[in-house]
Image: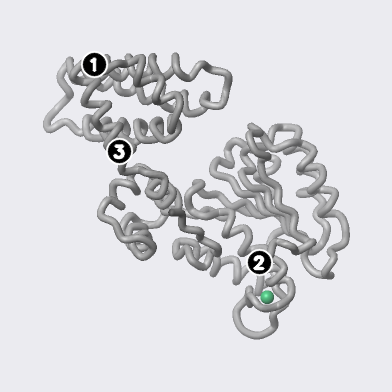
Amino acid sequence: MSTDIQSADALPWLAPAQARLRTMLSSERMPHGLMLQAPPGLGTALLARWIVNLVMCAGTDGPRPCGACKPCRQLQAGTHPDLIWVAREEDARQLQVQQIRDLSAALCLKSHGGGYKAAVIAEADFMNANAANALLKTLEEPSPQTLLILCSARPSRLPATVISRCQRLKIAAPKADDARQWLNSIHARDDWPKILEHAANEPLRALNLAESGFAELDTDMSSALEGLSQGRMDIVATAERWAKANLADRLDWLETWLTRTLRQAALPAAGLPSVPQATKIRRLYRLLGRVRGLKFEQNTSLNMQLAAEELLLQTEAALS
Ligand SMILES: [Zn+2]
């Protein structure tokens, strides 16, 4: 089962940003460049689509976007000729410079409908220096009635020259209670608090985790840790299984577990931690560093089975 969320209006934590954008538009302060800064599980792409809809809507009565005018219907159908959507191609590690060049060229042309032209760059952090350079001219000398939206979880990865030419709109994750309430309205279950912890409180990420079998993963990982701490795990066989399936989810799970364990260990009941405990904390920190490193190396040519074996050995040592 997978829940398909179609509109930013279905995501209550986006409402403050939507209100702000409506005000910007009505007071004619909509910038040419907008940077949506949010972690991936908050629905940034849906918000970007909503903003495009907001500026392109031709409705005259009531709140915009009206959902009924021609541009609104074209956007819903994905056929609006004045929207350019750029995303990483499948399996590509970066946005291609040619994609950005095409986008810049298209933004310079007159719009088909006589209104706004808009471009959205999903995961803008994945632009390399050449792609960012290709974008700069468009940001520096924007044509009138153009809107460029950059979605980025980590804007610090982008050149300052790009960031400084965009107005930044930061979207925060909702409070845990609000996130849980929203998730329960979609699908009631008891383990949302735990799933939300593993999803950094990002509701769409939590939904995705739940629907891709979090309960099984959680049981499997908990028993793996138990097996390791008791020194009764077949490490080679387990590494093979991990490398073949769900390694990314397992690394996420381990990262959350380690972060929680270290947070608890950092609050000793009284005074400084004892020497053995301090050694253990150091090992857990090193393990956390390794887990984070592996998350970035997953799609490289690294031998993942060997890497998983080393990780399991390191975990076993840290837990002993
Ligand atoms: Zn409309």
Q: Mark 1 or 2 closer to N-term?
A: 2
| Residue 279 - label | 1
Q: Mark 3 touching mark 1, by CB under 8 A?
A: no
Picture colour scheme: one colour
Residue 15 pos. (x, y %): 49, 66
Q: Which mark is residue 76?
A: 2
Q: Which mark is residue 218?
A: 3
| Residue type beneath disc 3 | Asp
Between the residue at mark 2 and the residue at mark 3, the CA separation in whole angstroms equals 37 Å
Q: CA distance from mark 1 to mark 2?
A: 57 Å
Neighbours of disc 1 within 10 Å: few (<14), some (14-19), many (20+): few
User: Sequence order check: which comes first, mark 3 or mark 1?
Assistant: 3
Q: Nearer the viewer, mark 1 or mark 2?
A: 2
Give the percent coordinates (x, y) of residue 208.
Answer: 44, 49
For badge 2, the amino acid type reads Gln
Element assignment for label 3: helix
The residue lying furthest to the left in this view is: 270
The tag earlier along the polypeptide, 2 or 3, is 2
Secondary element under disc 1, as helix, strand or loop, is: helix
Kind of element beneath mark 2: helix
> Which residue does the image show at 57% across and 59% down from the upper left?
47
Task: Give ligand 1's quarter of the image.
Answer: bottom right
Q: Is residue 315 left or right of residue 245?
A: left
Q: Amino acid at mark 1?
A: Thr
Judge whether 235 appears above or below 95 on screen.
above
Closest to the camera, between mark 3 and mark 1, is 3
